Amino acid sequence: MNNTCKICNKTFDESHSFSLHLFYFHKTKVKDYYDKFLKSEKEGYCLFCNVPLKFKNINKGYGNYCNNSCSMKDKTKKLNELRWSDLNQHEKLSCRNIKNWRNKEYRNKMINMQKNLWKDNEYRDRVIKNGENHCRWGKRHSIETLRKLSCLAAARALNNPDRNCGIGRKGWFESKKNNTKIFYQSSYELKAFEILEQIKSISSYKRCKFAVDYINPKDSRMHHYIPDIEIDYNDGTKHILEIKPEYLINDEVNKAKFAAAREKFNNFNVWTEKNLWTK
């Protein structure tokens, strides 16, 4: 918004300074100034239920809706009223993809097509090179590291076609051993829960609710780290389990975390792909 006073033509960098200027120099409330100079004809009423709205500030004015419910209802109504001819090419393609993806045959066809494309070395190298600067972990990897990670993901997808191999997979695992649902934050954790469910010497397991203090080697400051899984065995012993991809094991911060956890717990283990898919 342009914070220029329409009374004295003075410009301000921040809206807060502009509001103070109106109050102290012009003896005018922000709402009165907005109503006189900035308010449009239809502004001040909810776009869905037509209820009078409260004034928020000089930047937002009165807003458009009285609550989130009206906002969602109005957006849904507008989407339902859209005609196919009103949509642009991108919106039409999105609608088709959502509708087709619900079809199991179409979904399997697209997955198989992607797998066949990934077998092409030129296509695979091009995808790896394009994603070099877009690592989800917030740091830049070399092409060799990205190639190893991508080939590993492709190998898991080819060997396990019915499993979602994305590291970012989240959901709830229904544990019969614990008689409850446990939240998992990756496909690695899901696989770990499936393995723990089958081990007879384990009486129960759950997500850790305690933190471990460690010194971060990058900033030399104290930080907190929460392990992944707490395991109770039939003999009364407890084990702490951490799930990590193999390529993150040698990370400096993770090494510091693991060292602090091993000092605090006698039975602390780290599982990687080698443990999860070879057990």
Image: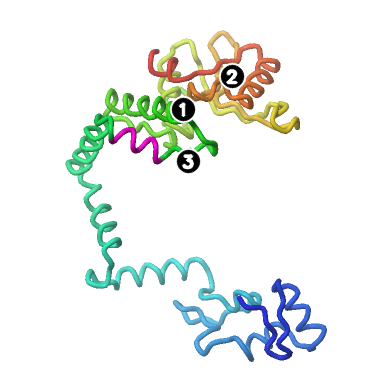
Nearer to me, 67 or 9: 9
Query: Which one is earlier in the sequence, the residue at label 2 or at label 3?
Result: 3
Q: Amino acid at mark 2?
A: Ile
Rounded to the nearest whole Å, what is the CA distance between mark 2 and mark 1? 13 Å
Residue projecting furthest to the right: 24
Q: Is residue 157 left or right of residue 41?
A: left
**Residue at figure coordinates x 23%, y 69% from the top left:** 84
Disc on res. 189? 1
Rounded to the nearest whole Å, what is the CA distance between mark 2 and mark 3? 34 Å
Q: Which residue is mark 2?
A: 240
Q: Which residue is mark 3?
A: 133
Q: Amino acid at mark 3?
A: Asn
Of the two numbered discs 1 and 3 in the rendering, the one whose residue sits closer to the viewer: 3
Q: Is residue 36 left or right of residue 112?
A: right
Q: Which residues are magenta?
A: 123-130
**Residue at figure coordinates x 63%, y 88% from the top left:** 35
Q: Position of residue 278 (x, y in %)?
A: 38, 13
Residue projecting furthest to the top: 235
Q: Is residue 224 left or right of residue 46?
A: right
Cβ atoms under marks 2 and 3 closer than 8 Å: no
